[in-house]
Image (spheres, rainbow, N blue to C red):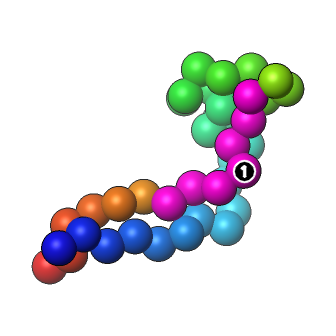
């Protein structure tokens, strides 16, 4: 199965740059990585 975990703290500017968004018109408000549960 798959599992996830919310990320409460992250570098906003770095995350925006990785995704190629400007941080003004588009920005991240929530992160939840998904991976295989072992």
Residue 34 in percent (x, y) is at 35, 60
**Left or right of 1, for residue 22:** right
Which secondary structure type mostly characterizes the magenta part of the structure?
A: loop
Answer few, some or many: residues within 10 Å of disc 1's Cα (few below 14, many 20 plus, some between 14 and 19): few
Q: Residue at x 24, y 69 (%)?
A: 2
Q: Is residue 12 above or below residue 36?
A: above
Q: Which residue is mark 1?
A: 29
| Image quadrant in which the N terminus is located | bottom left
Query: Is 29 one of the magenta-colored residues?
Result: yes
> Which span is picked out in magenta?
26-32
Q: Using the rendered view, name the quadrant where residue 33 is placed.
A: bottom left
Q: Using the rendered view, name the quadrant where residue 31 is placed.
A: bottom right
Residue 21 in percent (x, y) is at 66, 23
**Left or right of 5, for residue 25:** right
Foreground pick, 19 / 1: 1
Q: Residue at x 40, y 70 (%)?
A: 4
Q: Secondary structure at mark 1?
A: loop
Foreground pick, 38 / 29: 29
Whether residue 36 is visible, yes or no, is: yes
Query: Is 37 one of the magenta-colored residues?
Result: no
Q: Residue at x 50, y 60 (%)?
A: 32
Residue farthest to the right? 24
| Image quadrant in which the C terminus is located | bottom left
Q: Is residue 14 above or below residue 34?
A: above
Whether residue 13 is visible, yes or no, is: no
- Count how many numbered circles sit on residues in the image: 1
């Amino acid at each position: 199965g798959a599992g996830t975990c919310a990320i409460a703290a992250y570098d906003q500017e770095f995350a925006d740059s990785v995704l190629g968004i400007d941080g003004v018109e588009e920005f991240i408000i929530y992160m939840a990585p998904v991976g295989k549960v072992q």
